[in-house]
Image (tube, rainbow, N blue to C red):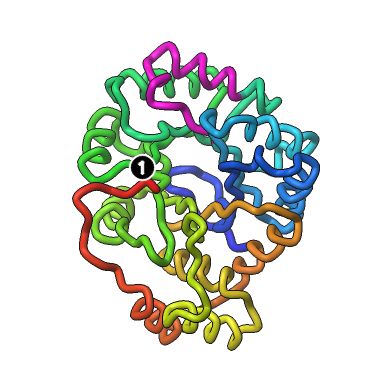
Amino acid sequence: MERRPFGPVPREVAVIGQGTWYIDDAHRPTAVAALRRGLDLGMTHIDTAEMYGDAETVVGEAINGRRDEVFLVSKVLPSNASRSETVAACERSLARLRTDRLDCYLLHWPGPHPLEDTFAGFERLREQGKILFWGVSNFDVPDLDAAWEAGGKGRIACNQVLYHLEERAIEHAVQPWCEEHGIAVVAYSPFGHDSFPDPRTPGGHVLESVAAHHGATARQVALRFLLRRPSCFTIPKASSPEHAADNAGAGALSLTDAEIARLDAAFPLGPRPRRLPML
């Protein structure tokens, strides 16, 4: 599995990780097996959140005995992101995950509490060794400007955002901003929400064509397209060990410039939206 520098983190992170939104809806032994299969295949970046129901407990079971392999990320709800409650929320997440630390802790989206208070909570957790780094999620450029001002240079590790072939809004300004400031971009929902391109559509046909040339799957090609810029990482969810293996297969895939151009034309960027999409 390819690894890259992750913003200011002095550790390279797998470009393809594992998301866990709705993973608690699956058959628990299968969900645990999928996460462990992903670890076996080098997808050692695991992302979760307190908002994700029982997902943190599923992750805790999956990484039991393998914690040191994992780049573990969780997120605090904006409603819980006051200075003191950020600390309390993290401690609850650590208990559910059965670990003593997070590699990165994120504010799930901009919320009602001042960023200075949230980041002060993050810094307290970092000083206590309960988190190693912190970042944000669903931040548009004005939010990032405010976060940079509130947190200071070199503090924000990543911005986790919605990004898939049919939703490329971050390419207008968010991704360039993050690259300019040395912040990793983490793409969530990289296959969309139950809307992966049908092979009978023009875009789906291009995906299938590129995939056939490489002996790969369309989903592997879709993941690799998102990773064409070195700032980007992605965290697809897997519902089974077989699905995890398919996701991991994108890690070794290499697309040509011509193939990237074909995909770019098949799934055009579109106009910049007024607000950064989250769903």
Q: How many numbered circles does the render carry?
A: 1
Q: Residue furthest top?
A: 84
Residue occupying image coordinates x 55% and y 77%: 254
Res. 233 visible in picture:
no
Residue on which the image places disc 1: 138
Is residue 76 in the magenta section?
yes
For image coordinates 58% across by 70% down, the residue present is: 220
Q: Is residue 96 left or right of residue 111?
A: right
The stretch of residues the image draws in magenta is 74-93
Q: Position of residue 181 (x, y in %)?
A: 30, 48
Answer with the quarter of the image where residue 62 lies. Answer: top right
Q: Tell me if mark 1 has few (under 14), some (14-19) or many (20+) residues whose alpha carbon lies within 10 angstroms of its own.
A: many
Give the residue type at disc 1: Asn
Left or right, residue 150 beside residue 107 = left
| Quarter location, residue 173 | bottom left
Asked if residue 128 lies left or right of residue 269, the reply is: right
Residue name at image x 23 percent, y 32 percent: 149
Residue drawn 51% across and 35% down?
104
Q: Position of residue 127 (x, y in %)?
A: 49, 20
Disc 1 secondary structure class: loop
Q: Main secondary structure of the magenta part?
A: helix
Note whether residue 129 is visible.
yes
